Image (cartoon, rainbow, N blue to C red):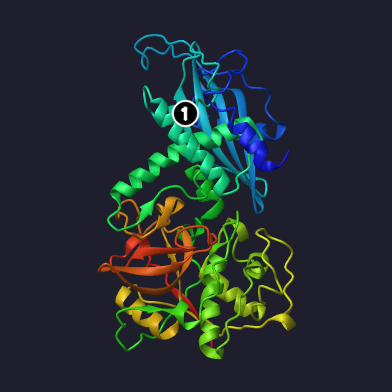
């Protein structure tokens, strides 16, 4: 059966189709089967983190476990659902009345990298083990995620239709019925989140369904973003010499031939490499009048200061390019989306850099520098970008803090739409995201920290 036919068959089995056979209930659902052996180690680690600081008599024990694993470079991300049994509370100094043993239903996200584990998120809530619902399954239906007491049939049908359109539009495939139901639940919850972001945005941006709409926030952050940008300081660069000329009202290097097509980093947190190669492509174009698409995979494989798909810093990447002796082209060193053995050959390097510089945090000076010197590597807080579709984003500052930057991108131009100033930002999530792969962010307000880590290579 073709993947799309299998997916439509699975969709037909969602709520509204024939009920599944009944079984013993946990949290208002059917019993889970034995967990895959690979899930037990991260589940036990999550339990250890949950019990940290508790006395032996109050520690919870692990019950049923289910979940899935996604590979991201050298790491594995485990998305787990587990029941925990908490011991009864019989201490009169803590509990007013003795309590019986309670059951919790918990969601955990665990990242494993090079033998080390990290708990990324934890959400637990008590459950009533007496309640059963043989139709809806362990995770409940997507309607329960909507937090509606009595959702209408029309609402159910609408969301089901939107999800069907989503999986067809973005060619989504899911291995099991359980995975399908989980992704549909996440999808409906993400629709609510996108509406909240929409209501709070002060620009013209539209938020809604994107190819990332079936991912949890934790999954999206772990797979596509770059926490090292705010966790590490990186190599100190010399300040750039300011440009004397005032910034023109608008400017766009795409119309000048200095920007390659939008690329796709895939399920790899290598945005830092794409941001830097985009900058170097522009610098080389200005010096040699030749636009070359350069290799991000070379940096993923050969930059030992950074962590490949687990994140990196532009300042380190510039140093790596200089130390390696240049960059090969995309054609010679193709992107794979995961770390490999370094295969750089100096004889194949087509581009070199002499140095790198840190740019001003003044956005007027940044605009003047860009118009004169070329596209700029920057880092931003990616708040809302999971659901961004088009328009000029202008999130509230508390929601998009400049102190929590987690995504590296490339400013290629600036201008105004309906008197709203914007930065035109080349992203690395493919042309099927945003405005043909581009993100437009409010200019002049330090939105999402766009001005806090601006840099460029120097080609002499």
Query: How many numbered callouts?
Result: 1
Instruction: Tell me the quadrant of the picture where the N terminus can be found.
Output: top right
> Where 285 falls versus 307 (above or below)?
below
| Frontmost residue, 59 versus 316 | 316
Is residue 26 shown to the viewer in this render?
Answer: yes
258, above or below 335, in the image: below
Residue 17 spot, x, y in % from top left:
56, 23
- In percent of width and height, residue 270 lies at 58, 61
Where residue 148 appears, as percent x and y from the top left, is 37, 27
**Relative to residue 46, is residue 193 drawn left or right?**
left
Q: Quadrant of residue 296?
A: bottom right
Query: Judging from the image, what secondary structure is the residue with disc 1 in?
Result: strand
Q: Give me the residue at 47% from left, 60% from top.
A: 407
Q: Quadrant of residue 8?
A: top right
Q: Residue at x 36, y 76 (%)?
A: 360
Please tell me how crowded label 1 is: few (under 14), some (14-19), or many (20+) other residues with Cα within 10 Å. some
Q: Nearer the viewer, residue 71 or 44?
A: 71
Q: According to the image, label 1 marks what residue?
A: 124
Q: For the view shown, which residue lies furthest in the left direction?
A: 419
Q: Looking at the image, can residue 215 be seen?
A: no
The x and y percentages for residue 403 are 37, 58
Q: Nearer the viewer, residue 5 or 287?
A: 5
């Amino acid at each position: 059966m073709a993947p799309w036919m299998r997916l439509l068959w699975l969709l037909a089995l969602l709520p509204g189709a024939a009920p599944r056979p009944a079984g013993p209930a946990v949290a208002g659902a059917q019993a889970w089967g034995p967990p895959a052996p690979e899930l037990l180690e991260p589940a036990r680690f999550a339990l250890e983190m949950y019990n940290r600081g508790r006395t032996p008599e109050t520690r919870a024990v692990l019950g049923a476990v289910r979940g899935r694993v996604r590979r991201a470079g050298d790491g594995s991300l485990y998305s787990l659902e587990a029941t925990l049994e908490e011991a009864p509370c019989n201490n009169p100094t803590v509990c007013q009345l003795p309590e019986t043993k309670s059951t919790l239903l918990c969601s955990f996200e665990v990242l494993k990298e090079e033998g080390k584990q990290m708990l990324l998120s934890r959400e637990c809530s008590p459950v009533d083990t007496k309640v059963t619902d043989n139709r809806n399954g362990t995770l409940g239906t997507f309607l329960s995620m909507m937090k509606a007491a009595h959702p209408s049939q029309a609402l159910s049908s609408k969301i089901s239709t939107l999800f069907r359109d989503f999986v067809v539009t973005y060619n989504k495939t899911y291995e099991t019925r359980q995975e399908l139901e989980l992704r549909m639940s996440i999808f409906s919850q993400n629709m609510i989140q996108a509406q909240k972001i929409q209501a709070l945005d002060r620009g013209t941006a539209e938020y809604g369904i994107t190819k990332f709409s079936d991912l949890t926030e934790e999954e999206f952050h772990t797979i596509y973003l770059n926490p090292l940008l705010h966790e590490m300081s990186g190599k100190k660069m010399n300040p750039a010499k300011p440009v004397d000329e005032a910034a023109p009202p608008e400017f766009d290097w795409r119309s000048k031939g200095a920007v390659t097509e939008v690329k796709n980093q895939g399920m790899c947190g290598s945005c830092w490499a794409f941001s830097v190669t985009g900058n170097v492509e522009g610098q080389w174009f200005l010096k040699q009048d030749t636009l070359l698409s350069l290799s991000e995979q070379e940096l993923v494989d050969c930059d030992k200061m950074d962590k490949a798909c687990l994140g990196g810093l532009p300042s380190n990447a510039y140093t790596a390019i200089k130390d390696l002796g240049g960059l090969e082209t995309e054609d010679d060193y193709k992107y794979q989306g995961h770390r490999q053995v370094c295969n750089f050959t100096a004889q194949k390097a087509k581009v070199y850099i002499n140095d790198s510089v840190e740019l001003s945090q003044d956005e007027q000076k940044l605009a003047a520098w860009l118009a004169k010197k070329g596209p700029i590597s920057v880092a931003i807080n990616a708040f809302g970008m999971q659901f961004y579709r088009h328009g000029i984003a202008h999130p509230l500052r508390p929601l998009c803090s400049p102190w929590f930057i987690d995504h590296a991108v490339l400013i290629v131009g600036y201008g105004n739409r309906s008197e709203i100033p914007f930065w035109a930002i080349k992203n690395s999530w493919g042309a099927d995201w945003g405005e043909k792969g581009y993100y437009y962010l409010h200019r002049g307000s330090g939105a999402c920290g766009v001005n806090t880590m601006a840099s460029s290579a120097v080609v002499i």
